[in-house]
Every structure is written in C-alpha cells, then in structure tokens.
Image (cartoon, rainbow, N blue to C red):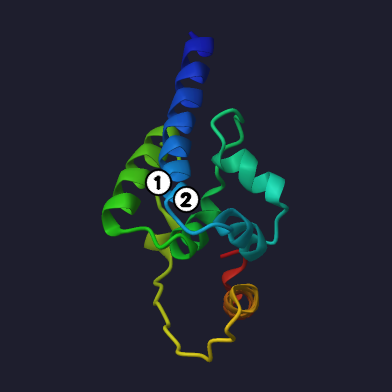
C-alpha cells in the first residue's frame, strides 16, 4: 500500500512538472537560466525541478518567482496550482496567499543587445528579491 501511495505522489509530481515544462517551453530561450539566476541556483537544479525524469519536487518557496519570471497567465497558474496541490496536499497555503504581492513595472533604456538587456533585467529582479529579504520575509 505504501508503495502505491508513493507511486501516486510521484505520478502527481510528474503531472505538475509536465505542465511547468510545457509553460517554460513556450517562453523565450534562456528562461530556465533566468530562473536559475533568480533563485540563486545552478542550472542543473532547474532541470531537476522541471524534468519528469527526476523525482525532485519543486519547493513551494520558489513558486512565486517562477510564476513571475515565466509570466504565468491566471489560467496557467490555476491549472498548475491544482496539480501542485494534488501532489502536495499537506501544504495548505501558497506563498501567494500568505504574502501580499504587487507587480512593479518600470521603463528602462534598451541597450540594443539582448544579452545586456537580460543581464540588466536579472540584476533588477535580484535586487527586488534581496530588498524583500531585508524586509523580513526571508526566502521569498
């Protein structure tokens, strides 16, 4: 019985990873690296948390960052959270429910170079994360 239950949880983790991977695949090239940079993790960690071949679950604390970086639509986020909640029923409250968030949009100079623009965007995202941590929210 325990084996069947574990298999079921693994299948449910695979189900949300399939959704996550499909959403990321629709985003621009380099999205997985941008996620790794924003989370302060190595690219292989992103492969493990998004790849169905790996049993590594996606840590809840990273959801908001991934939703933001990948620009999940409300429908995508809802579908993903349903699958995530099915795999992790013991995690009753999402970060998005525990902490109020707001989106900040800024207009900045276009450097005329995709690499420079991406590095600038990553630096701004990292700065915002670090400022939130200073505010006492810990690992957001």
Image quarter hosting the C terminus? bottom right
Question: Can residue 71 be seen in this snapshot?
Answer: yes
Q: Quadrant of residue 68?
A: bottom left
Question: Can residue 88 be seen in this snapshot?
Answer: no
Q: Which residue is mark 2?
A: 24
Q: Which mark is residue 116?
A: none
Q: Which numbered mark, 1 or 2, is in the foreground of this view?
A: 2
Label 1 secondary element: loop
Q: Earlier in the sequence, mark 1 or mark 2?
A: 2
Q: Is residue 71 above or below residue 91?
A: below
Q: Which mark is residue 92?
A: 1
Residue at x 42%, y 54% (from the top left corner): 94
Residue at x 58%, y 54% (from the top left corner): 32
Q: Is residue 45 left or right of residue 63?
A: right
- Front residue of 113 and 26: 113
Q: Mark 2, residues whose alpha carbon is within 10 Å: few (<14), some, or many (≥20)?
A: many
Q: Is residue 59 above or below residue 105?
A: above
Place of residue 8 in the rendered image (x, y in percent of width and height, measured from the top left): 45, 20
């Amino acid at each position: 019985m325990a084996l069947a239950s574990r298999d079921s949880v693994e299948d449910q983790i695979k189900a949300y990873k399939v959704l996550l991977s499909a959403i990321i695949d629709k985003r621009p090239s380099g999205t997985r690296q941008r996620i790794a940079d924003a989370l302060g993790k190595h690219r292989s960690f992103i492969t493990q948390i998004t790849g169905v071949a790996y049993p590594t679950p996606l840590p809840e604390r990273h959801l908001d960052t991934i939703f933001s970086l990948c620009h999940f639509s409300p429908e995508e986020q809802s579908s993903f959270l349903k699958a995530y909640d099915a795999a992790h029923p013991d995690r009753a409250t999402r970060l998005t429910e525990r902490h109020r968030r707001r989106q900040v949009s800024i207009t900045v100079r276009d450097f005329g170079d995709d690499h420079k623009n991406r590095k600038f965007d990553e630096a701004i995202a990292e700065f915002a994360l670090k400022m939130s941590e200073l505010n006492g929210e810990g690992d957001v």
